[in-house]
Image (cartoon, grey):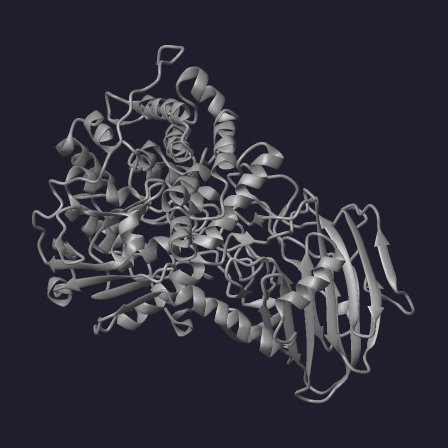
Amino acid sequence: MKLADVDPFIGTQPTDLPQPTGLAATWWWPKPQIGNTHPGATYPLGMVSACAYSGAYPTGYGEYALSTEGVPPRMRERPVASGVTHFQQSGTGAIRKYYNYVRVTPMIDRLDELGREWEITEEAASPGAYAFTLSNGIRGEVTVGPKSAVHRYTFPETADARLVIDLSVGGLDIPYGATVPLRAHLESLDIGQAQGEIVVEGTPLALHMEADTPHWRQLLWYDRRLMPGGRRLDFDAIRPTTMRPFGLMWQGSVTAGQTIELRIGFSLRGVDQARANLLGDCPGGTGYDARHAATRAAWSQHLDPIAVEGRTDAGAPDARTVLGTAMYHSFIKPAIAPNESPQWPTPGPYAFDICTMWDIYRTQLPLVSLLAPERSADLANALIQVCEEEGNFPIGYRMAKGSDRFSRQASGLAHTMLADLCAAGVPGIDWDWALVHMLADLRRAYGEDFLTGGRAEPISHTLDIAFAYWCTARVAERVGDARVAAECRLLAGRWRNAFDPGTGLLRESTFYEGTKYNYSYRLTHDMAGRIALAGGDEAFVAMLDRFFGYGADPVVQPGVNPSGEEMEAGYALGRFEGLNNEPDMEAPWAYMYAGRPDRTAEIVHAALTNMFGVGRGGLPGNDDSGGLSSWVVWASLGLFPVAGQDLFLVNAPAWPEAGIDLPSGEHLRVEAVGFAEAGAGGGPRYVVGARFNGEDLDRGWLTGSEVRGGGVLRLELAARPGEWAREHRPPSYPSEAAEVTRRL
């Protein structure tokens, strides 16, 4: 994909898509109908982002307030900003850490006006850059590097221009959303140079600033009052009740059209490293243009590996923008920041903004692992380091003290990523070290109940932990520990303990953002056993058909502030959440294990054509750090990763020609023969035959080694399903359940 294919504004406003038709009209959306993305400047998997700040939920950008279900209510009547802040979330929901530190505000008003919101006009965004005009006449542009940000402001003519840095701002303007620094230090070094550090959420955030402000005054300020002659501000114990804004300001005159540039290096390890990061991020020059060019080049490197061609229909340009933007969103998070851990002093891998593994482990992490395995190794090593230092693999990890395990969502998810990387032979990971921590993590928290009682509650954690043991067995086999591998495979068989044999569904329990139906169709390592437990192929397909709404009436989606009764009625449908949320996003591919790839084709087609579009309302729900967008990428290519199993399921792609340039230098090409004819009526396309590297392929999957080895996957499409892949099912790995200590 190309930079021109990306629209960073997609997902920044409430869902605005055509009324769903057909199967998609029966899907019920429980989560907020907004992408919760922001258009700010980002660097691929980098530490820093920067965007106009309105205080809105959850990124600090936009016009909408806190919402956990339905259509989000308005918080602002129009796009406004009080400046530019740094470190934004990407498409997340209620995760409690909202960042937005170090506000930069260009002003032609008195300092007393700091915090005022100006209307935003003339916004522009592309990968690595964001620009806007404030109603005070100032044009702002910002770009970022991995650990830095560069601002450029163009002022109208005035004798009293200001560039104000506010270190007291953090979080959002929602109840309980603001962040107050605990301690702070700010120091004016020389003309146009300053440094400082704030401790927020237990983490020290240091910055080194350099401003091109010839003949301007450089002043510290406190409580919106200047401190002439002052060179330092130190606060040892800030409290919410005594909090007053503080920061630095440059002040002077400008002619019309004059630009002022500000460069900021960030670090979680002190001001000296912040300065080094600024210089290191800009080897070709520290100015805006040089930094912007380097960041655009980095984005091109991450977007270029995937290319699609061949569509000539009227919807092709929009489909290309949807896919290009999905690729872009898939590479914003997690924030990989080597040598930046504020919690332990040793150098090495570090990552934060993992919000959360539950959102990204099925789709986004496999995409990063395939296209940028060295970045995946960095993340994997960072997770292992967290486990060594803090005792558990995190489910989420923030720029805050200690991991946020957010245990309600899931357990054992890091094991899935590690198993895939191990199977792929990704270098740079000590697998003996990894295995030690994989085992230790599974024996803690919910894992203790799983070991002593045979299952864990909430019951979905039983599936998580059983699959994590299966993934751990694969790593144990890699390092040659047959005893551990056998023990883990035995424990992996306890997935059965999560199910009620009488219904073929998960046992009654509590479920995070869903019901037992949303969690009952995940892709386990023993899908053959799962289908047998449900009563066989026909019974399992019938259950899936009910779940996906075949023959059901259209539903009404929740509106603004939906009532409890309305939400309960929706959940009672036991229906697919329609890519509005994560729990069931892999479920469309469960049909393939029951010999019904045609059903998978129908559901994926309905989702791609009804649930995604261009414009600011082009997403059906929270993008969740690329978890949703990466689903779009895979579905468009006609492949879907079975996370943890190093397996890719094959389906009809959304383009006649698709290609993936692999890091090894190989190329995987997907050709869809009969694409236009099969979709002439607007309905789904079915794969009726396949060849891989010139040989017939009668199965609906490729192994990871086949995908990474490249070649040509040639798919024959038709408007009606055939017999392809009905007999040869994707592999299953049965295991006997270990003895349990109590009757289930």
Q: Is residue 250 left or right of residue 294?
A: right
Question: Can residue 22 be seen by looking at this rendering?
Answer: yes
- The residue that appears at 60% across and 71% down in the rendered structure is 142
Residue 37 image position (x, y, % from top left)? 48, 59
Residue closer to the observer: 7 or 306: 306
Q: Is residue 611 left or right of residue 39?
A: left
Residue 40 image position (x, y, % from top left)? 54, 65
Residue closer to the observer: 670 or 22: 670
Q: Which image quarter holds the N terminus?
A: bottom left
Choose top left, top right, bottom left or bottom right for residue 156.
Answer: bottom right
Question: Can residue 126 be seen by looking at this rendering?
Answer: no
- The residue that appears at 29% across and 20% down in the rendered structure is 736
Residue 314 image position (x, y, % from top left)? 23, 73
595 lies above or below 374: above
Q: Which residue sits furthest top?
A: 742
Q: Which image quarter holds the C terminus?
A: top left
Residue closer to the observer: 606 or 263: 263
Choose top left, top right, bottom left or bottom right for residue 400.
Answer: top right
Residue closer to the observer: 368 or 141: 368
78 lies above or below 375: below
